[in-house]
Image (cartoon, grey):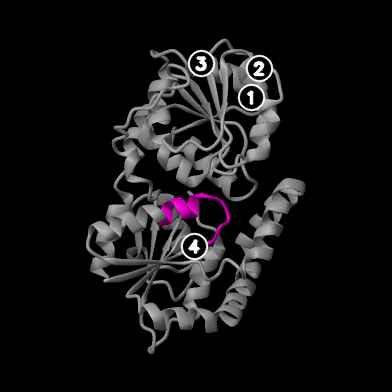
Amino acid sequence: MRVLIASLPIGTGHDIAARALAEACLQRGMAVEFSEHLVGRARIETGLYFWALKYLPKQYGGVFRWEDRTGYHWEGHRRHWMQTGKEVLSHVYDIYHPDVILATHPFALNAWAGVKSKKRPFKLVGVLTDLSVHRFWYEPMADAYTVWFPEQVADLTRFGVDANRVWQTGIPIRSSFRDPAWELPLYAKDPIVLLGGGLGMGPYYRILRKLSEIDYPVVAVCGHNEKLHWHLDQKTWPDTVSIVGYVEKMPLLLRHSRLVVGKPGGVTAAEVAQSRVPWILTHWIAGQEEANRDRLVGHNMAVRGDKGQLAARVKELLPEDSPKRQEIIHAQEKWARPHAAQAIALRLQEL
């Protein structure tokens, strides 16, 4: 079986899921290729997306919810991708002749749908990396979708998708999260880990300053955001605070952390659940991560720490015998899906 994995560089979660899927498919003897042929075409939209998140977050969130209700923007984007990307993607298909295309971003799903035909009869699967389903994920030409929570099955069926075509496998994460066996010099024993996603987005300084006032070790992970890392390094911090960039061995750091603080990205949610560590949500991207937040809290997999609640939440969850701490860990054990990528690869062979 030949598998083509298509994504877009809008956030790091889509790429992490793509790599996890590639590993699982290769283990089952499939031939795997990556398609980055839409990256150039998405450059403007990517720039506008990050600009809106930085300067107009409330307005972006309002537009995001409006689009989900009306479907207006979804229809326009689907037509746009089908018209401008069809020639390029048709050529890509003719080179690789994939049996299945896995799309970890909705625009990639819509674009490849425009290529599907009797002449090019591949199977098309949308791999969701958030905890809800926005209307722009709906694609009539898709053969299947992969989701995590049962509510996402209901999200898709409201658009008319047959529930039998929705696979509740979980979000693909790196296999190293199943058993992080390497050795890593930890920055502190059982630290509080502050995350902001792979791009280090969010009101980091304010949150880290509040955490530094608590007499407990804190590791602030800046990801690939070198500007943020440099900015924080210029400040004066207590000896309990460690500031680091991208952490290659994140599975081990999370497994040995006391608490996780940060934003509710979908892939991060899957990784934290597998790590069995209480999670305090302090900030989120307007739109999709607001939905992630609500579903994580609804499933007791995390608590909110915004609106001045951060210090109280930390003190509540630090003790080993904290009832809320045990409740969160139990919920994470229930919902963790460490073999999601392998489950998706298996389902592909059944298509």
- Marks 2/1 in contact by CB < 8 Å: the verdict is yes
Disc 2 residue type? Answer: Trp
Q: Which mark is residue 7?
A: 4
In this rendering, would 276 be left or right of 302? left
Q: Tell me which numbered mark, 1 or 3, is placed earlier along the sequence.
A: 1
- Cα–Cα gap, marks 4 and 3: 39 Å
Which residue was labeled with disc 3? 316
Disc 1 residue type? Answer: Leu
Secondary structure beneath dot 3 equals helix
Secondary structure beneath dot 1 equals helix
- Marks 4/1 in contact by CB < 8 Å: the verdict is no
Instruction: Depth check: give the residue in front, 84 or 322.
Output: 84
Secondary structure beneath dot 2 equals loop
Mark 2 Cα shell of 10 Å, populated few (<14), some (14-19), many (≥20): some
Which residue was labeled with disc 1? 208
Give the residue at the far top of this rendering.
Answer: 215
Q: Tell me which numbered mark, 4 or 1, is placed earlier along the sequence.
A: 4
Percent across and percent down for residue 104 are: 46, 60
Q: Tell me which numbered mark, 2 or 4, is placed earlier along the sequence.
A: 4
Q: Residue at x 68, y 51 (%)?
A: 61
